[in-house]
Amino acid sequence: MKTRLILIKSMLFTALAISSYQATALNIVLSNDDGWSSIGIQAMKAALVAGNHNVFLVAPLDEQSGSSAAINTNALEVIKQRGSADEGAHEYSVALAGGQEGAEPATTAALGVGIVQQAIGVEPDLIVSGINAGQNLGAAAQISGTVGGALAAINSALAGGQIPGLAISTDNICNDDSATCHDANAAHYDRVAGFTADLIEKLSKNRTELMPQGIGLNINYPALETVNGVMVSRQGRTLTIGGQPISITFGCFDDCSNVEIGTAVPAGITGFAPLDLAEIKNADTTNNANGYITIVPIEADYTTGVTGRNNSVIKNFIQKIERIVKSMEF
């Protein structure tokens, strides 16, 4: 009798565990700005599929970095690249009409919402944008196509502002063409994907909502095999390269001021200027440079100061994230 009771308890425990796990499985749109087949998005896909999530990968045909939250209003071309029987996810590339140039990242994320609605009849539970090759810290977040993909979820103009959005970025461990470097980067993106999938799993447990409406997350993972931990941070004010705050300068490569009307002159980024701007306290730029994964709660609202939102909602959400990351192991 005792043995039977133990067996019944064990079966109940297993059933509850399975039920709980299945309850946290999400319908996820996965996008980025590096292209549908890039190393980062494919690593993130694999981690989400391993977590039993229903993944719809919808991303630009090719790299579209620096796009911010730009959208395409003209016709698009969508190609289904893989089905769920191939590697566990539905995978689509999105291009402008003609199929030669990729669509904007925010556009592909919003398009992913429509694809999910057609496929299963409901909106997705989450939009994940990344893993981006190149961190989006401080002022870089405002021009990032990866962050733009997450903003597509929380911006009421594109997805009704009802869907949580999460951006995840990192730097490569190395940048040469050797097999050793390739393997090191692949292992690193797997680590970043595993962390992100674990965070999503913890956010979804016993949930009434993943995130408050209109709130997203911008996450940046240092290019380190071992990190010092996680810090919920503020978005820094600077764009930093090599530890130095800089400003990108644009201009003409030839003299634009004295050319004849109708003459074309080559132009673009002319350089980088040092920036004399003190960073704010608890900035993601500083924390990340010190070896911490940074998580910055973001909004699509550009209003300065108090916006009228119930700030206690945001405060409670930040405290929830802080409790979650304290329980995570590295």
Image (cartoon, rainbow, N blue to C red):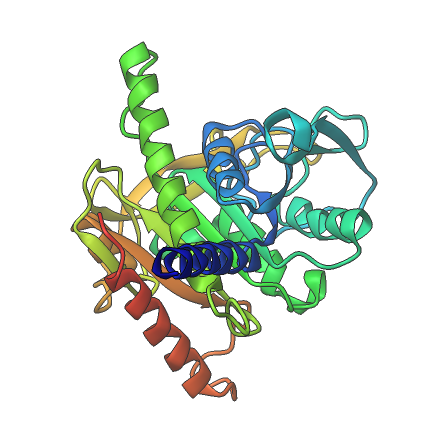
Residue 32 location (% of width, % of height): 55, 41
Residue 181 location (% of width, % of height): 29, 18
Residue 127 can be seen, yes or no:
yes
Residue 291 location (% of width, % of height): 18, 48
Depicted 156 relative to depicted 22: above or below: below
Indicate left or right for 124 with 147 as reference: right
Using the rendered view, name the quadrant where residue 37 is placed.
Answer: top right
Residue 146 location (% of width, % of height): 51, 46
Residue at 56% across / 60% down in the picture? 23
Using the rendered view, name the quadrant where residue 125 is placed.
Answer: bottom right
Q: How many marks?
A: 0
Residue at 71% across / 59% down in the picture? 123
Depicted 108 relative to depicted 92: above or below: below
Residue at 32% across / 40% down in the picture? 272
Using the rendered view, name the quadrant where residue 172 is placed.
Answer: top left
Q: Residue furthest front?
A: 1
Quarter occupied by the N terminus: bottom left
Indicate left or right for 169 with 59 as reference: left
Residue at 24% across / 67% down in the picture? 280
Indicate left or right for 157 with 6 as reference: right
Residue 283 can be seen, yes or no:
no
